[in-house]
Image: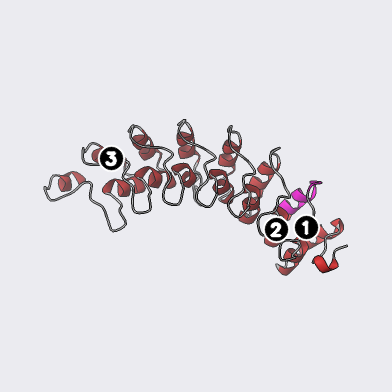
Amino acid sequence: MVKILLAQQEVNAAGTSYNGETPLSYAAKCGSEVVVKILLGLEEVNPEEPCNYGRTPLSYAAQRRHEGVVKLLLERGEVNPDKPDNYGRTPLSYAVEGGHSYAPEGVVKILLEREEVNPDKPDNQGRTPLSYAVWHGHEETVTTLLGLKGVSPDKPDNGGRTPLSYAMWGGNEGVVEILLEHDGIKPDKPDHEGRTPLSYAAEGGRERSVKALLTREEVNPNKPDNRGRTPLMLAASGGHRSVVELLRPYGAVISRATRS
């Protein structure tokens, strides 16, 4: 069908939709390797043509984990594997997200094989690929990124939130344990709101993560955020009885008013 349409004089293979996406972008997004090959063979098709949001065909293919399409696009010398979109997000930043029923490791490894790819490159919000990987709970990808030279395990975003804070927020306790095993992690580092990883874990009722944090001598179970809320207060307000019981033996208090 694509070949029939392309044979028509009126058809523009490099035309764009209302949001600036090209036929190649749609083919890459859908994972159609055959159509991608056809379009890449046309002189008028730019494999790097961004949409109105600055996203390239590679960005879309990486987000959907279409390994075959990613490989085809990367064979083209003009394709930049680390090109950020208008939000500062690179193909790797999208690739590490994965999905509910599939993991992103295949595409992540393909991208990381390219020396142009910066695995620690922050987007406009200051979030790195590691930040997104921990948020989505992909343990293998987190382990891979932490093993790379140049990746900061504790790099905060523009709001001061570290990957560990995002892991607590996202609720993947396997990822939390992987991060806590890394020497570069500061387990009690507050963000710009004064929220520590323990604060997020307590609010979310993450019993296993709270236990892991309380074994670290650097962690202050009574540290209030900028609004005066302690981890115990947040756990209690969320109705997380088991977390409340974990915090009490450590001298945890409800608020600044009751702190010693």
Disc 2 or 1, which lies upstream in sequence?
Answer: 2
Q: Residues within 10 Å of mark 2 (few under 14, many from 20)?
A: some
Left or right: residue 180 compared with residue 137: right
Residues tagged 2 and 1 counted as in contact (Cβ below 8 A):
yes
Residue 188, above or below 118? below
* Residue type at tag 1: Lys
Q: Kindly identify which numbered label has been placed on residue 194.
A: 2
Between the residue at mark 1 and the residue at mark 3, the CA separation in whole angstroms equals 57 Å
Residue 203, position as x, y percentages in the image: 69, 62
Q: What residue is pinned by disc 1? A: 223
Please name which of the two marks, 2 or 3, marks the residue nearer to the observer: 2
Q: Point out the frontmost of discs 1 and 3.
A: 1
Direction from residue 93 to residue 199 in the image, left or right: right
Label the magenta part by its dominant secondary structure.
helix
Residue 178 in the image, given as x and y percentages of width and height: 66, 42
* SS category of the residue bearing label 3: helix
Residue matched to label 3: 34
Which kind of residue does numbered mark 3 sit on?
Val
Q: Is residue 22 left or right of residue 211?
A: left
Q: Residue 60 lies in magenta, yes or no? A: no
Q: Which residues are magenta?
A: 209-218
Quarter of the picture containing the C terminus is bottom right
Q: Amino acid at mark 2?
A: Gly
Q: Quadrant of residue 45?
A: top left
Q: Mark 3 or mark 2, which is nearer the start of the sequence?
A: 3
Q: From the viewer's perspective, is residue 117 above or below residue 204?
A: above
- Mark 1 element type: loop
